[in-house]
Image (cartoon, rainbow, N blue to C red):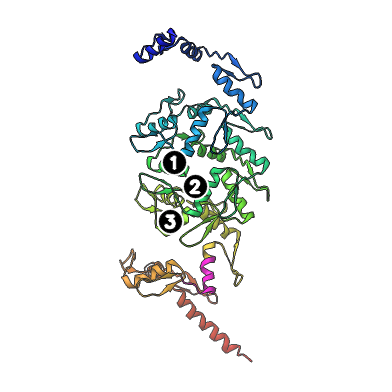
């Protein structure tokens, strides 16, 4: 009784007579100090006979034993759910009562648990108390710190019993196990598509709602998931901390570096189960497999067009919004696609990394090289469905097919005239504006069309590229050659009259 009064008095006065010699922390009770000392000594005297796990306190040990016995002595009177600890039941009861006793004074957000509230406060204070001694990175939560440390140690404690693959997180292992079971327990109520985990389903559901809850504070752009926002944020910071030791190229994320290294190793670890084609990246095989299934789950709310991947949809949506987020550092020209920016920047650098194996001609884009090589090979893989004419490029086929369909999608804003190609519209508009961008280097005469300039310059150069097949006479203009060739056909018709 006397000792209880003494302890109560120490609580009131704040007296803590028992001090740790290791770290200086003080306690009101000697039993608390003894328990604390186990942190420094590493002593865990309570060992589970079922699994061998050890504990520093009997309370933690007793709580752990309930896992093996399956006993859940604390039951909710509202819904019948049971718990191993009374504290878990008390927390659960707040779901029914709606009670959130911990309120943030900064933003007014409320929480059911003090631990969640304390973690939230660190967002406002910027506090990250757990710092990695290896790389200096800091974390708000101890669990995230421990997870990060596994990157440095290389430890992957969770191993798949089916294929031996190891993981840093238990959640990743559980997700991986669905590959072996082919179980997809989470189904979309809108389209019936199934998913291995709830987070994938939740992300997919945003396609149907059109919701983009994650917004960039720098430019206001919105995203469906936090990972896409985090990736986007690196555009503004320009940070690329991950460097390739083979070529020196830097990357914003470690996963991108890992993927890039396969360029050097030529590794293609992902194989299509349908056609056997190999891929360097997992995202590529996922996209490829949709060719076999025909799935196009990403829907444009503006025009109704569907796409295989979210990236394709995002790129397409820029056609409607007119957004051009990628700017050239040399001339401030902007682009809607990062690939277009990279190709453009090669104009400034003069870089042409792609060489033709037939004639040594160089190109800044791989696509341009492939199209060029078809001149040598004679391959024309794009066939018109109306007249069997074939083309080297899909763009040329698309323009050609408009001859059959009569579609002229490019309309003049001055006179309502329509055209099959944007280039034709551009040239036509100059008849209204009077623009003549092409100037002769010999006499300064100007032209609205490039081919008109080239024809004109032959007056100065004396070039005659068109040769008659009958008499070897040469002409500066194709029209003159055609008129001349009629003299030969006229003579032939007189000598050989038709019967």
> Picture coordinates of residue 276 (x, y %)?
68, 48
Q: Secondary structure at mark 2?
A: loop
Q: Any magenta on residue 345?
A: no
Q: Nearer the viewer, mark 3 or mark 2?
A: 3
Q: CA distance from mark 3 to mark 2?
A: 29 Å
| Mark 2 crowd level (few <14, some 14–19, many ≥20, 10 Å Cα) | few
Task: Please give the residue where the numbered disc 1 appears in the rendered image.
Answer: 230
- Where disc 1 sits, the SS reads helix
Asked if the residues shown at circle 3 and circle 2 are in contact, with their CB atoms under 8 angstroms apart, the answer is no
Q: Indicate which label's residue lies in the foreground, 3 or 1.
A: 1
Task: Kindly identify the residue that appears in the image at 33 percent across and 36 percent down.
Answer: 106
Can I make out residue 350 in this image? no
Q: Report the predominant secondary structure element of the magenta stretch.
A: helix
Residue designated by label 3: 318
Q: Residue at x 49, y 75 (%)?
A: 473
Residue at 38 percent across and 40 percent down: it is 237
Q: Is residue 496 left or right of residue 430?
A: right
Q: How many marks?
A: 3
Quadrant of the rendered image containing residue 291 = bottom right
Mark 3 crowdedness (10 Å alpha carbons): few <14, some 14-19, many ≥20: some
Q: Mark 3 near mark 1, Cβ–Cβ under 8 Å?
A: no
Viewer-side residue, 434 vs 275: 275
Secondary element at tag 3: helix
Q: Is residue 400 magenta?
A: yes
Q: If the image is split into quadrants, where does the C terminus sit?
A: bottom right
41 relative to 417, above or below: above
* Residue identifier under label 2: 353
Q: Which residues are magenta?
A: 397-408
């Amino acid at each position: 009784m006397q000792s209880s009064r003494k302890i109560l008095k120490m609580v009131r006065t704040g007296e803590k007579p028992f001090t740790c010699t290791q770290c200086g922390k003080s306690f009101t009770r000697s039993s608390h100090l003894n328990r604390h000392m186990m942190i420094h000594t590493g002593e865990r005297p309570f060992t589970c006979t079922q699994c061998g796990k050890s504990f520093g306190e009997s309370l933690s040990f007793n709580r752990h034993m309930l896992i093996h016995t399956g006993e859940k002595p604390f039951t909710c009177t509202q819904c019948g759910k049971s718990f191993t600890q009374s504290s878990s039941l008390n927390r659960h009861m707040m779901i029914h009562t709606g009670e959130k006793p911990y309120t943030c004074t900064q933003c007014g957000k409320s929480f059911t648990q003090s631990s969640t509230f304390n973690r939230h406060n660190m967002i406002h204070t910027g506090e990250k108390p757990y710092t990695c001694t290896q790389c200096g990175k800091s974390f708000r939560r101890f669990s995230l710190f421990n997870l990060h440390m596994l990157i440095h140690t290389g430890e992957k404690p969770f191993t798949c019993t089916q294929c031996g693959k190891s993981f840093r997180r238990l959640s990743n292992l559980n997700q991986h196990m669905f590959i072996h079971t082919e179980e997809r327990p989470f189904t979309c109520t809108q389209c019936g598509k199934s998913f291995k985990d709830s987070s994938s389903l939740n992300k997919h559901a945003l396609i149907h709602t059109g919701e983009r809850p994650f917004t960039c504070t720098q430019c206001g752009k919105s995203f469906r998931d936090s990972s896409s926002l985090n990736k986007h944020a690196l555009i503004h910071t320009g940070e690329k901390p991950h460097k390739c030791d083979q070529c020196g190229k830097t990357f914003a994320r470690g996963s991108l570096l890992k993927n890039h290294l396969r360029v050097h190793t030529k590794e293609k670890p992902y194989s299509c189960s349908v056609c056997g084609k190999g891929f360097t990246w997992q995202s590529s095989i996922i996209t490829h497999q949709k060719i076999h299934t025909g799935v196009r789950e990403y829907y444009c709310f503006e025009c109704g067009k569907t796409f295989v991947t979210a990236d394709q949809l995002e790129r397409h949506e820029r056609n409607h919004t007119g957004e051009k987020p990628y700017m050239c550092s040399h001339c401030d020209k902007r682009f809607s696609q990062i690939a277009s920016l990279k190709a453009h920047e090669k104009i400034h650098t003069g870089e042409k990394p792609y060489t033709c194996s037939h004639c040594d001609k160089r190109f800044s884009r791989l696509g341009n090289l492939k199209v060029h090589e078809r001149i040598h090979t004679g391959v024309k893989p794009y066939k018109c469905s109306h007249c069997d004419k074939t083309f080297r490029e899909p763009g040329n086929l698309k323009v050609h097919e408009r001859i059959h369909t009569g579609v002229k999608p490019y309309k003049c804003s001055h006179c309502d005239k329509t055209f099959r190609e944007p280039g034709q519209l551009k040239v036509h508009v100059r008849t209204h504006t009077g623009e003549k961008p092409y100037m002769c280097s010999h006499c300064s005469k100007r032209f609205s069309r490039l081919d008109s300039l080239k024809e004109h310059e032959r007056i100065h150069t004396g070039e005659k590229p068109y040769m008659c097949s009958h008499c070897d006479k040469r002409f500066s203009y194709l029209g003159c050659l055609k008129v001349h060739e009629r003299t030969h056909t006229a003579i032939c018709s007189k000598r050989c009259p038709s019967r």
